[in-house]
Amino acid sequence: MKYKLFITDYDGTLGHAPENTIDSEVLEAINEYEKRGGKFVICTGRMFGSIKKICDKVGLGGIAVSYQGAVIKDIKTGESLFDGGVTPESAVKVVKELRKLGILICLYIDDHLYYEENSTHHIFIEKYQLLLDTKAVLVDDLCEVVLKEGKNLGKICGLCPEEEVKKYADQLNKALADEPVMFNSGARYLVECINAEHHKGNAVRFLSNHFNIPFDQIITVGDSTNDIGLVNGPWHGVAVGDGKQALKDVAKEITVPYSEKPVLHLLKKYCL
């Protein structure tokens, strides 16, 4: 077994919405990998409850990283190993900046999804809830909710047309360059804001230390721009064949496209 720790993105890599499951052949390979002593981790931008529901459905345990690295928990028990995220102070500034763009805003606090009304892009929140199999709470003012709760946020999202995502992410990164946040995207119509230090790459480093597995025995795989930190590190980072070009540019390997089951392909190639 070349790699003792296998860390994969979910959407577009291991599975996808709206099916929200894991292919039986892939699951069989994961189970065999774990029987042989390997550690398998899902590292996703989704909230913990969403990825837990998928894992519970197929009987997959272990550890899951959610919100792009802000939260790391045991899938079965919900025990928290790492809890970070965007501070309330930064979150208020992010919400105000997103409002200037006139797009629909939603955010996560304690695994609950909240959003402000925006009639122009209302279709996006309906689609988002359906894809993640979750229910969002409509509020009058997200800033008031953030300050009242006084807790770190998993992430903040701006929902907008696909062709605007990169432009808005670049614009927001410049506008809030002095804040400890970063903007990227894990889906076609999502601009996502996370803590700049609590990203997927930070999660890999945390798990390396947690399992006492050196970087040269770790393989990671993803497909989108929010996987750059996951793939671009001193471990073996792999990009899905039909993933984003920006991710391929930093990957050490480009594997098969999603339709050809990249996780299964890599498990067979290096671990089984």
Image (spheres, rainbow, N blue to C red):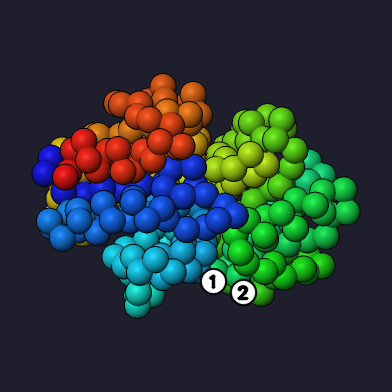
**Which amino acid, mark 1?**
Asp
Q: Position of residue 188 (x, y in %)?
A: 63, 39
Q: Nearer the viewer, residue 126 or 92?
A: 126
Query: Farthest residue in the front direction?
Result: 25
Disc 2, SS = helix
Q: Position of residue 240 (x, y in %)?
A: 41, 33
> Which residue is pictured at 87% across the width and 48% down the height?
120
Give the quadrant of residue 161.
top right
Of tags 1 and 2, the one toward the viewer is 1
Which of the image's four quarters has the N terminus?
top left
Q: Badge 1 is on which residue?
A: 110
Relative to 104, say whether 150 is above or below. Answer: below
> Which residue is pictured at 66% across the width and 74% down the height?
148
- Is residue 138 toward the left or the right of residue 216 in the image? right
Give the quadrant of residue 229.
top left
> Which residue is pictured at 60% across the width and 70% down the height?
112
> Which residue is pictured at 48% across the width and 68% down the height?
53
Q: Residues within 10 Å of mark 2 (few under 14, many from 20)?
A: few
Callout 1–callout 2 Cβ contact below 8 Å: yes
- The tag on residue 149 is 2
Relative to 252, say whether 217 is above or below. Answer: below
Cα gap from disc 1 to disc 2, whole angstroms: 10 Å
**Which amino acid, mark 2?**
Glu
